[in-house]
Amino acid sequence: MIPTVSLQLYTVNAALEPDLDAGVARLAAIGFDTVEAFAFVDRAPQLKQAFDAHGISAKTGHAFLVEESIPLPDGSVMTAPSHADTFAAAAVLGIEIVIDPFVGPDAWTTREGVERVAARLNAAAEEAAAQGMRVGYHNHDHELRPRIDGKPALQVLAELLDPRVVLELDLYWASAAGIDVPAFVAELGDRIVAVHVKDGPMREGISTASVPTDQTPAGQGDVRLAEALAAATALEYAVIEFDGFDGEIFDGVAQSHRWLTETLSAAATPNKDEVHA
């Protein structure tokens, strides 16, 4: 089965804030019928209205499940919505997987810290299951740089998670952390059901502490995206995302959509020589 091509809405948030309907319409015109929502708890009805108007659905969504207080870049602290409110809003939108997008670097330096993250995700999975949903975790680079018992901290997390908890592997940030991404995807196997398809030059020093602005449309950078996608045996959603892009964002998104659609289709098409072997 070919994974569903999606887009993390944060990518185009600057266009959505002044005119949500117009921004969603532009995504539909590119060819998206699925997106990944973020900050959806307080605006689920508005999002649903815009999605319904343009034939789009949100099957995955980002919301905080582990931490109750989230430090923001400006020094303030955000209180995360309750799990009950989060899953209720997800139900309004038809979200199938609620994915925690960020737990800070300090949690990933010790086994005890990772065990705490796993315990909270496992508890959230129990709540989500009662609503017919799954939960997951999305990484940046700081979950993969620390080693615990010789393994990247994110891999230790995977070993501690309830089978109902899935991973959304950000291929760009995993590559920035020095991970052999295709091999890592293959090793984690059916735990990975979604990926963030993101590209750009790879060099020393890439980190969420200072997000690069030179990310590129998918297939135009150094991330081994095609190999990673081919290695993902249980992939359901391939989610395009940009954190920083110098060009016109909808053009970058359209280029990524075209590359990703063609790459996934080609991978699903049997080789003629293999068919007649």
Image (tube, rainbow, N blue to C red):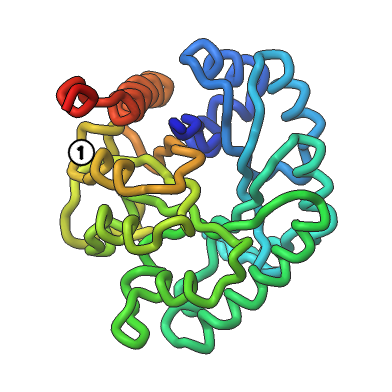
| Residue at 72%, 65% in the rendered image | 124
Classify 166 as above or below 58. Answer: below
Classify 214 as above or below 127. Answer: above
Frontmost residue, 33 versus 1: 1
Q: What x and y, as percent, mark residue 143?
A: 41, 69
Q: What x and y, as percent, mark residue 23?
A: 58, 20
Q: Secondary structure at mark 1?
A: loop
Q: Residue furthest front?
A: 277
Could one spot residue 214 in this view of the protein? Answer: no
Q: Residue furthest top?
A: 29
Q: Quadrant of residue 247?
A: top left
Left or right: residue 131 compared with residue 205: right
Number of numbered markers: 1
Left or right: residue 211 compared with residue 100: left
Q: What x and y, as percent, mark residue 195?
A: 43, 46
Dot 1 amino acid type: Gly
Could one spot residue 204 in this view of the protein? Answer: yes
| Residue at 30%, 61% in the rendered image | 184
| Residue at 53%, 88% in the rendered image | 112
| Residue at 67%, 63% in the rendered image | 65
Q: Quadrant of residue 144?
A: bottom left
Q: Which quadrant of the rendered structure holds the C terminus?
A: top left
Q: What x and y, as percent, mark residue 170?
A: 40, 51
Residue at numbered disc 1: 221
Classify 222 as above or below 6. Answer: below
Frontmost residue, 216 versus 235: 235
Left or right: residue 122 compared with residue 72: right
